[in-house]
Amino acid sequence: MGYFVGDAPYTSFKGNNAMISIPNNRQAFITMRVLYPGSVNIKVGKGARLAFSIISEPVVNEHNIRICADVGKEGMCATTLNLKGSPQHTKLKVRGAAGDSSTLALNYILQHKGMLIGNTSTKAGGRAKISVNALIMPSGCGVADTSVSVAHAGSSSRTEINVAGVLHCDMHSSFKGEIYIPQKARNALASMRGKFMAAPGASVSAVPVLKVHSKDARASHSMAVTSLSEQELNYMCSRGISKEDAIALAEDGLVTAMVNRIADTISSIIESAK
């Protein structure tokens, strides 16, 4: 499936399937490079900490990745998937569960060239925090069909879904986000934010869904598909910035903001482990 950078004493392999198990109150920082289809099963014990990064550079045309992350009580886990390469079809399936008073961050940097179908579903226990951060940057004629769903299973849980996309001509992105808060999940807090910059010829579909059944919950969402207006372009051009550079600066600002957000989830793991 790939190789690890550094010591990974809590990891074992069975074929192309990796198993990562962090014992209670231990900590680990692991990086894996993935070349072939496979799965990663992650179990973080009570009070344990894990910062896990996957660099996926597939050498096959049909690429499947499955990730399952289970975080125990008061544990913390941040996983970051950087998808590169040029497979024709990629399927990404992620399942996550955050136990009581735990933190789970699922981060994605998607730089694929072919067709990507991604599905992420998570469950938050009482006083748990789940964040899903996705940066969608296909290249060539890349297509991204992604969905994220979070279910609040306990009270005082918190959810953040953040997605940003940069799409040039002939690219397409379809995103659906769903947050479910049942009646029993009291004092829950949830937000979903998305912004896509689409050039002429690109297409974007973004659908936010909130299913809130608890009177004590607070939930919000915003989704935007934008491009620089003629007024904004003219203003920047009047300051000596070319049209191409103006668009690049706007895209860089969107990308930088998401990368910083992803970095913050990793930094929180490192700081808590000190």
Image (cartoon, rainbow, N blue to C red):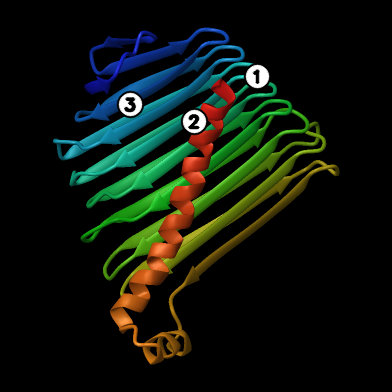
Q: Residue 74 carries which label?
A: 1
Element under disc 1: loop
Identify the residue at the far front of this view. 274
Q: Are the residues at dot 2 and dot 1 in contact (C-beta closer than 8 Å)?
A: no
Q: Which mark is residue 226?
A: none
The quarter of the picture where the C terminus appears is top right
Q: Taking 28 as reference, is 178 above or below it?
A: below
- Decide: few, some or many residues near mark 2? Use Cα within 10 Å; few <14, some 14-19, many ≥20: many
The residue tagged 3 is: 31
| Residue 200 in view of the camera | no
Taking depth in this image into account, of 132 and 116 the one nearest to the observer is: 132
The residue tagged 2 is: 78
Q: Which residue is drawn at 34% across and 87% down?
A: 240
Mark-to-mark CA distance, 2 and 1 = 14 Å
Q: Taking 73 as reference, is 201 above or below it?
A: below
Amino acid bearing label 1: Glu
Residue 89 lies in quadrant: top left
Mark-to-mark CA distance, 2 and 3 = 12 Å
Specify whether 198 is left or right of 159: left
Q: Which residue is drawn at 69% across and 21% down?
A: 100
